[in-house]
């Protein structure tokens, strides 16, 4: 009987996980941090206020994570407009499709998040909060309206806020690119 041998990819895993205890961190000025606070607050409040105007809930948890990227790491490739809007739209479409075909369960939530990551990668729209957009949608058993409201409208409000707050001060500029 042949003895099972663990593949080297698995046995070498601990070695590949080694990294320095501390990494290099770029300096973040108090001014940048304060403006991130103000901008993030304005962005989420804008969605909340427009929710009142349209009479439809627009604020989903993944927008909080988008705010971190847009206002706290606005130079990140993952925070650029294509990624922000595209990542949320792709992920919400995945959520709608998964709910329509498979329903809502822990398994479909997991598959939906994986599929959202896959589709964002294929479309070059990776935006980490998109995974939460898919999860929230499947968890809530959403229909097609989820794509437009709250997702597209909320992402657009955040984008408009980011365009204003990241360009109104001299120490920031946004976006780095549109597509």
Image: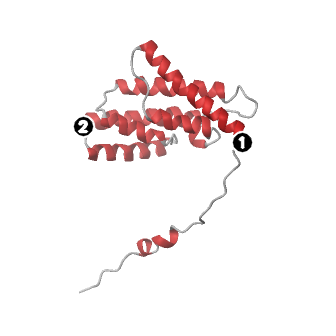
Specify the quadrant of the image occupied by residue 116: top left
Which percent across, then down, holds residue 12? 46, 74
* Count of residue discs: 2
Residue found at x 31% / y 30%:
142
- Viewport quadrant of the C terminus: top right
Residue found at x 54% / y 34%:
67
**Residue 117: mark:** none
Where 49 sits versus 142, above or below?
above
Q: Which residue is mark 2?
A: 103
Where 8 sits versus 53, above or below?
below
Tell which of 27 and 139 is nearer to you. Answer: 27
**Applied colour scheme:** secondary structure
- Residue 170 lies left or right of residue 136; in this view the side is right
Where 38 sits versus 33, above or below?
above
Tag in front: 2 or 1: 1
Can residue 76 be seen in the rendering of this structure? yes
Secondary structure of residue under mark 1: loop
Which percent across, then down, holds residue 135? 36, 39
- Residue 160 lies left or right of residue 27; in this view the side is left
Which class describes the residues within 10 Å of circle 2: few (<14), some (14-19), or many (20+)? some
Can residue 176 be seen in the rendering of this structure? no
Residue found at x 40% / y 27%:
147
Secondary structure of residue under mark 2: loop
Which percent across, then down, holds residue 157? 53, 23
- Residue 32 lies left or right of residue 111; in this view the side is right
Q: Which residue is mark 1?
A: 29
Q: Looking at this rendering, what residue extends furthest in the bottom direction?
A: 1
Which percent across, then down, holds residue 117? 43, 45
Which class describes the residues within 10 Å of circle 1: few (<14), some (14-19), or many (20+)? few
Q: Looking at this rendering, what residue extends furthest in the top direction?
A: 53
Residue found at x 35% / y 36%:
95
Compare marks 2 and 1 and give the one earlier in the sequence.
1
């Amino acid at each position: 009987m042949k003895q099972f041998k663990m593949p080297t990819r698995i046995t070498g895993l601990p070695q590949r996980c080694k990294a320095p205890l501390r990494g290099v961190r770029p300096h973040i000025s108090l001014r940048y941090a304060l403006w991130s606070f103000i901008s993030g607050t304005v962005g989420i409040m804008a969605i909340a206020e427009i929710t009142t105007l349209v009479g439809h809930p627009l604020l989903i948890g993944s927008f909080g994570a988008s705010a971190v990227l847009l206002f706290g790491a606005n130079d990140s490739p993952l925070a650029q407009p294509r990624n922000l809007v595209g990542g949320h739209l792709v992920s919400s479409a995945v959520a709608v499709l998964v709910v329509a075909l498979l329903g809502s369960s822990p398994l479909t939530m997991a598959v939906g998040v994986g599929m959202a990551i896959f589709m964002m990668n294929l479309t070059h729209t990776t935006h980490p909060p998109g995974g939460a957009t898919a999860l929230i949608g499947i968890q809530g058993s959403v229909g097609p309206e989820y794509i437009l409201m709250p997702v597209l409208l909320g992402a657009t409000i955040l984008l408009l806020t980011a365009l204003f707050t990241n360009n109104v001060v001299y120490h920031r500029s946004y976006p780095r690119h549109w597509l």
